[in-house]
Image (tube, grey):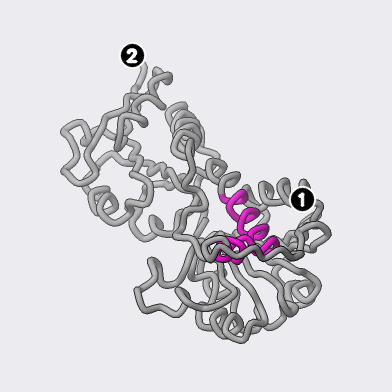
Amino acid sequence: MAPVTTIVLVPNEQGVQALAGNPDVRAVRYQPDEPFPAAAAEAEVLVPMFLSAGAVGALAESLPRLRLIQLLSAGAEAWLPRTPPGVRLSTARGAHGGSTAEWALAAILAIYRELPAFERTRQERRWDQRGTDTLQGKRVLVLGAGDLGREMRRRLDASDASTTFVARTARDGVHGLAELPRLLPDHDVVVVMVPLTAETTGLVDADFLAAMPDQAILVNAARGPVVDTAALLAELTTGRLRAALDVTDPEPLPEDHPLWTVDGLLLTPHVGGSTQGGQDRAWAVAARQIGLFASGADPENLVHGEY
């Protein structure tokens, strides 16, 4: 009996090359803004372009043999309502954790070492020599103990900061969400690295922020709706807290939104995982997941429930 070949729809040549080494898989290119090619009728796997849930999600309904959607992103929330019944969803968890943790570390260091302020004085041609704060010795609470959280801890360890993990489920070395009110007052920095789910939406609310000590730093490297924007704005406006956001709610920010001008905020436009080599890493993870599927095994990164 001839071996069965799994047809995989990929959005670019990089995907074709990433799957070329697997004899059980045949990659078929499609154009994200055009109808699927004829071979799509036999496709069992669809790989969408990064952050393309809208257009490609609508087309997924037209694939009669589709059994798996393999993402190039770690977050799955945009695809959960667009995944057809009976089709499984797998993420690129493990591809972007290092880059996102690197962004979070850079943001914390920029705030403590006052790099934005020094850049402003450079533009004013003013030599403002003075001391700054340091990350060394700081207590950092990392909300999320998955790939992102583990990568964050590696970088914090190298900076001589201490790390406390909090996640949905308490386990060895990880506190549960119910312990947050007790833990927050004792930490200088809170780094948010959780998936967006019904449980985490609005998790960082006014009570959460009020429990953080004066001059503490909130870092959101997760998704914008995890943080209550109005509550955060209230704390930033008084100057009691500081923050670094790579994601916002709404996103992108409207031109007249107060986050553009509030003091005490370092803001970047959702670029934490957007680095050189990021797509190579994502395709390497995707190729492994697809290889497992083609062999009859479950991909390791299957989404169960909301993540």
* 298, 147: nearer the viewer: 147
Q: Quadrant of residue 28?
A: top left
Q: Which mark is residue 8?
A: none
Whether residue 53 is in magenta: the answer is: no
The residue sitting at 51% across, 61% down in the picture is 246
Instruction: Tell me: 223 left or right of 8.
Output: right
User: Can I make out residue 208 in this image?
Assistant: no
- The residue identified by callout 1 is 159
Q: Position of residue 192 (x, y in %)?
A: 62, 63
* 10, 45: nearer the viewer: 10
Q: Which mark is residue 2?
A: 2
Image quadrant containing the N terminus: top left
Secondary structure beneath disc 1? Answer: loop
What range is drawn magenta here? 100-121
The residue sitting at 28% across, 39% down in the picture is 65
- Label 1 packing within 10 angstroms: few (<14), some (14-19), many (20+): some
Q: Position of residue 79 (x, y in %)?
A: 38, 55
Q: Is 35 located above or below residue 233 in the figure?
A: above
- In front of the other: label 2 or label 1? 1
Q: Position of residue 42 (x, y in %)?
A: 25, 32
The residue sitting at 16% across, 33% down in the picture is 38
Q: CA distance from mark 2 to mark 1?
A: 56 Å
Instruction: Tell me: 71 left or right of 203.
Output: left
User: Can I make out residue 94 in this image?
Assistant: yes
Q: Amino acid at mark 1?
A: Ser
